[in-house]
Amino acid sequence: MAIEGVALTQFNDLLWLMAQESSGVVDVRNGKSSARGLYQLLRPQYELNPNGEKSFGNAVEECQGGIRYILGRYHTAASARLFWEKHHWY
């Protein structure tokens, strides 16, 4: 979070999203899609990781990619969580 300049107030929602998406398992893969990593980024979003696809397996870089996706799409982790709670995906 510090690397990405994200306020600690977003921690709980980021952690909650990670728990829903990957249960905190680094480089976990979804057998039904290209979703991968702590925040289950799809192939078009792999570039949000600092080193693209090479970032998978590095927990810090997977978090960076997830944070970039969440804030880029939803602006806050709380907004992403609300969307996830309604749709069971984000």
Image (spheres, grey):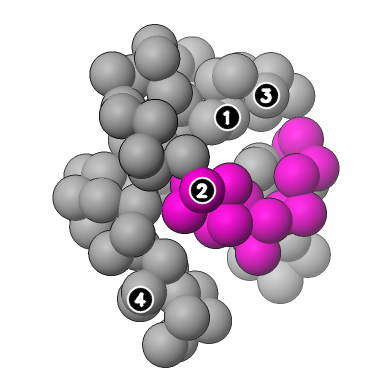
Q: Counting other residues with Cα less than 10 Å from the Cα at mark 2, is it few (<14), some (14-19), or many (20 or more)?
A: few
Q: Is residue 35 left or right of residue 79?
A: right
Residue contact at pointers 4 and 2, CB within 8 angstroms: no
Q: Which residue is mark 4?
A: 83
Q: Is residue 61 left or right of residue 27?
A: left
Separation of residues labelled 4 and 1 (CA atoms): 21 Å
Secondary structure state at the residue bearing disc 1: helix
Label disc, if present, on residue 62 of the rendered structure: 1
Q: Position of residue 14 (x, y in %)?
A: 49, 47
Residue type at numbered disc 2: Asn
Q: Position of residue 67 (x, y in %)?
A: 40, 37
At 42% across and 66% down in the image, what residue appears?
81
Residue closest to the eye, 65 or 19: 19
Task: Please identify the residue farthest to the front as the structure is shown.
Answer: 9
Q: Is residue 23 magenta?
A: yes
Q: Which residue is mark 3?
A: 59
Q: Which residue is mark 2?
A: 12
Residue contact at pointers 3 and 1, CB within 8 angstroms: yes
| Residue 88 versus residue 19 in the image, above or below | below
Separation of residues labelled 3 and 4 (CA atoms): 24 Å
* Sooner in the amino-acid sequence: mark 1 or mark 2: 2
Separation of residues labelled 3 and 1 (CA atoms): 5 Å
Please state the extent of the stretch shown in magenta in the rendering: 12-27
Residue contact at pointers 4 and 1, CB within 8 angstroms: no
* Image quarter hosting the N terminus: top left
Q: Counting other residues with Cα less than 10 Å from the Cα at mark 3, is it few (<14), some (14-19), or many (20 or more)?
A: some
Secondary structure state at the residue bearing disc 3: helix
Label disc, if present, on residue 4 of the rendered structure: none
At 75% across and 44% down in the image, what residue appears?
24
Q: Select label 1 or label 2 by which is in front.
A: 2
